[in-house]
Amino acid sequence: MDYIADYMIDKKEEIKELEVVDRDIELKPNNEFAVSLIGPRRAGKTFTIYNLIKKLNIRDDDYIFINFEDDVIAQSRDDIRQIVQKHVELYGRRPQYLFFDEIQSMDKWESFVYSFIEKKKYKIVLTGSSSRLLSREIATSLRGRTVNRVVFPFSFKEYLKTNKFEFKKLYSSIERAKIKNMLRDYLNKGGFPQVVLNRISRNEFVREYLNVVLYKDIVERFRIKNIDVAKFLLISSAQSFAKEFSVNKLYNQLKNRVEVSNKTLYEYMSYLNEVFFVFLLYRFSYSTKKSLLTIPKLYINDTGLSLSNEIGRKMENTVFIELKKKELNNIHEIFYFKDYQQREVDFVIKERNRVKELIQVTYASSKDEIERRELRALKKASELFKCKNMKVITWDYEDVSEGIEFIPLWKWLLAND
């Protein structure tokens, strides 16, 4: 029996039967470069491939999909190198697309993938599990012959699509109220597909996700020994998002309780960043070196993982993720601003060598609820950086005043393509 051929046919039938949510992720595979899907675990990298197959109506004879962690593939290592020949035997033609999921599970996968890239005859998309190999490392191993595409949990716009929301240019007061209700739900539950599609409760998902990140992505992957310290850092991150996060301060809290070095804490934090659980935002400086020496603000990959109920911080984290997606796609760089008088601006958007935009995020429904110090910080940064593009993202206040645009979060998220 030809197990590989049966697998290839059965997999395509399985994909046809899957219900897949359309994502706002643009993939344009070509014959020159492989596409490497990167992002947090459980964000939907594999389903992004399924979505592409369905969206483009790719015919069975035009593609190969292999999940290298499937049992049949694991038992047929020698035969897998002949997959194109198998495809030609089945369909009488060479495939246009090669989709390799969990590619790290194949021995010497780099040479295997590169042999296809080198031929320039196939459109190739790759994913890798962060528990054994990060997608980012796939890109590194195929240096110069792959492009990254970021896959995060559902954006608010995608979340609305799953709820059959009808997008319009103008909304009635009742419709706006419904949008804000759904936004609050989104900020609390987050955008991970399993939660949004009601396949698992948010609380159950968070418990399981934090354990998997701790033991699979951190302990197993980086072979760390001090599990309790790693767990403490993980929980602290989920509690202290959208705030300055000082590893030195954390070290001072721990040093009298457990045996741990400052260096170890910095290493563990870098691991959390590496697996896309946290992101660090540094204070703005025209000097990269000076910026990296500042105390960063910390954000998590999805507000559903937060161990805090503060809506304002969840709003800020959500704005950060949208801005971070563009940074990872090399559209701009993002920082925060803070001067010696502790005046702070949440986000400084830099393109090339100039500051393009300044953004504050506040949980306010009227101008009276916006703290004056936030506006003073915005104006001060505007003077320093000669940037007139100032924005305050609010909960429910909209206006243009004193050169500042005030815009509700829901409206900003829907317009932020």
Image (cartoon, helix red, strand yellow):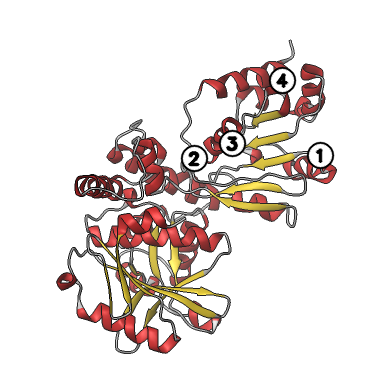
Q: Tell me the element at label 2.
A: loop
Position above or below: 20 against 213: above
C-alpha span from label 3 to label 1: 19 Å
Q: Position of residue 190 (x, y in %)?
A: 34, 47
The answer to whether the residues at label 3 and label 1 have Cβ atoms under 8 Å apart is no
Of the residues shown, which amino acid type is indicated by label 2? Gly
Of the residues shown, which amino acid type is indicated by label 3? Leu
Q: Which disc number belongs to residue 121?
A: 1
Q: Which residue is mark 4?
A: 4
Q: Which residue is mark 2?
A: 44
Q: Nearer the viewer, mark 2 or mark 1?
A: 1
Using the rendered view, name the quadrant where residue 30 is placed.
top right
Q: Position of residue 353 (x, y in %)?
A: 56, 80
Please give left or right for residue 292 compared with residue 196 in the image: right
**Residue in view at x 50 percent, y 54 percent:** 224
Please give left or right for residue 128 compared with residue 414 in the image: right
* Pointer 3 local density, CA inside 10 Å: few below 14, some 14–19, many at least 20: some
N-terminal of the two: label 3 or label 1? 3
Please give left or right for residue 379 compared with residue 42 in the image: left
